[in-house]
Amino acid sequence: MKKVVVTGALLFASVSAAQASSVITDWSMNQSGLAVGNNNSPAPSTGSGTATALGMTNSYNSTTSVNTDDIVATGGSSTGSAGPNAWRVRGQSPGNGWSSQAPIGTQGAEFDVSTAGYQNISVSFDLYFTTQAPAKMQLEYTTDGSDWVNASTLSYTANQAYILTNSSSANTVSGTYFFQTGGQNFYNNITADLSGVTAANNDPLFGIRIVNAATGADDVAYNGTAYNNSSGNWRYQNVEVSGTQVSSVPLPAAGWLLGSGLLGLMGVGRRKKAA
């Protein structure tokens, strides 16, 4: 009988281990070969995917801006051991790119990652705001490559007060968003649990956007003053998409067979004991 109990425990332990979340794709911004300097689409450090800056080529504020992103040393990130560098998203020539005239959800960065073979998708990232940067951010996701949804499960455990919900102002995204009031700093391990979004499972068209959550009068710096439209930027690090392997999760029928087998073995054990 003891042998049966041990065998069952090992089987269930092995199933639990197989269901552990693993990284699908990660942009640490510090991998070997990713040099400091101009880079409009940094390669991931783990897995495969595409990073793209959004909205930095524009003619807002009676000036011109051309997308000019780079990998730059930025101290302060503490998630894991990624290193000192981050991806700075901005425009130049001569405008800064970021603007309160930009519509909600159009400025920031997009990260496209196929989740084929995975389910229970989750997202985490570190984001650096300079002093004059727009302070309101939202996380969007897509399951078809074209339609984007504001993530309602955005979380920041270091200071959950930075997670707000808007239902009244037309100049801030409807629903959940992040509003940092701490000033220039890295805000590490901002997360979103998308395990409830079944369409994100096993999805070759999955992607996320970390973008501006406000426009016009609602587009403010950390201290609540209007964004100056001439300086400030966001810097991205440790952008990670994770999930559990679809093949590692037993189907209901498989779970029934496993349970039946264990019950059968236990029955055999009882009969032997009775004999």
Image (cartoon, rainbow, N blue to C red):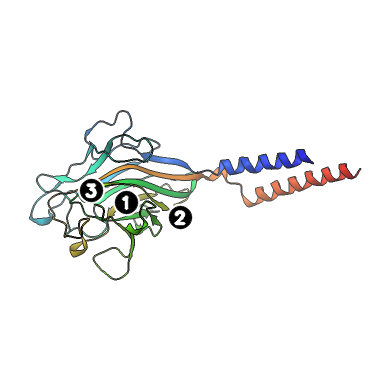
Residue 208, percent across and down?
Answer: 35, 50
Q: Is residue 114 visible?
A: no
Which is more toward the observer, 10 or 50? 10
Circles 2 and 3: CB atoms closer than 8 Å:
no
* Towards the viewer: 46 or 247: 46
Name the residue nearer the viewer: 168 or 158. Answer: 158
Disc 2 vs disc 3: which is toward the camera? 3
Q: CA distance from mark 2 to mark 3?
A: 36 Å
The residue identified by callout 3 is 184
Of all residues, the one furthest to the left in this rendering is 62
Query: What element does badge 1 sit on?
Result: strand
- Quarter occupied by residue 160: bottom left
Q: Residues within 10 Å of mark 1 (few under 14, many from 20)?
A: many
Q: CA distance from mark 1 to mark 3?
A: 21 Å
Q: Give whichever of discs 2 and 3 has the lower sequence position.
A: 3
Q: Quadrant of the C terminus?
A: top right
Q: Callout 2 environment at 10 Å: few (<14), some (14 to 19), or many (20+)?
A: some
Amino acid type, mark 2? Ala
Residue 209: give its label. 1
Residue type beneath disc 3: Gln
Question: Mark 1 or 3 closer to N-term?
Answer: 3
The picture places residue 132, in percent across and down from the top left corner, at: 17, 51
Q: Is residue 32 above or below residue 22?
A: above
Q: Where is mark 2, residue-wise?
A: 199
Q: Left or right of 131: which side holds 240?
A: right
Q: Residues within 10 Å of mark 3 (few under 14, many from 20)?
A: some
Q: Are marks 1 and 2 in contact (CB under 8 Å)?
A: no
When the figure is inspected, residue 150 is found, relative to residue 64, above or below; the finding is below
Q: Secondary structure at mark 3?
A: loop
